[in-house]
Image (cartoon, rainbow, N blue to C red):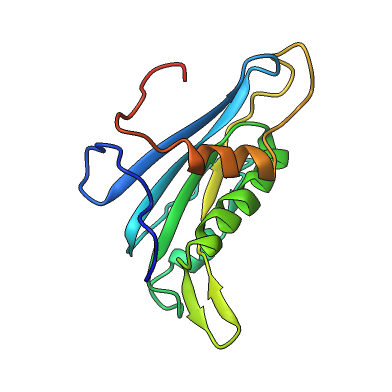
Amino acid sequence: MAEALGGSRALVPGLRVGHFTDLEALTGCTVVLAEEGWVGAVDVRGAAPGTRETDLLLPENTVERVHALLLTGGSAFGLAAAEGVMRYLAERKRGFPTPGGVVPIVPGAVLYDLGRGKVHRPPGAEAGYQAALAVGEEVEEGSV
């Protein structure tokens, strides 16, 4: 049986939120986990969008459920945080079932925040994993 994904009181039942913040680099990431997965949709706009797996959200594609959503700083570098979220979900056997095991579906989008902190350290896989682990009783708001 799959392990529970945490217990934060999100605004939408079944969704759980976790954050990772790097105060020295002034960046971080937020993960929204879906207990049973949810149907997603996307509208990508702008001159330089930074996204991951958003094409999977088109209705004609095979994948019907999203297991987590990543919002990350670090510009395109920050998309690496999705690897950590995928590892977290795979360890709990959450994802799209395949003969070779589950494949967690984690679409993401980036925020350009490079050059703001004292160091250049965009969120990576460990940041995504820590954000997923940080799912708690309350949803933090503001600068988290």
Q: Nearer the viewer, residue 87 or 124?
A: 87
> Quick check: 104 above or below 21?
below
Residue placed farthest to the top in the image? Answer: 118
Q: Nearer the viewer, residue 101 or 1?
A: 1
Q: Nearer the viewer, residue 41 or 74?
A: 74
Residue 4, position as x, y percentages in the image: 35, 55
Residue sitting at x 60%, y 57%: 87
> Quick check: 101 above or below 109?
below
Residue 106 left/right relative to 59: right
Q: Nearer the viewer, residue 48 or 67?
A: 67
Residue 14 left/right relative to 124: left
Quadrant of residue 135 in the image? top left
Residue 97, position as x, y percentages in the image: 48, 79
Residue sitting at x 64%, y 41%: 48
Residue placed farthest to the bottom in the image? Answer: 99
The number of callouts visible is 0
Residue sitting at x 67%, y 41%: 126
Q: Quadrant of the N terminus?
A: bottom left
> Quick check: 123 above or below 95?
above
Residue sitting at x 49%, y 50%: 44
Quadrant of residue 57 in the image? bottom left
Quadrant of residue 124 in the image? top right
Residue 56, position as x, y percentages in the image: 50, 67
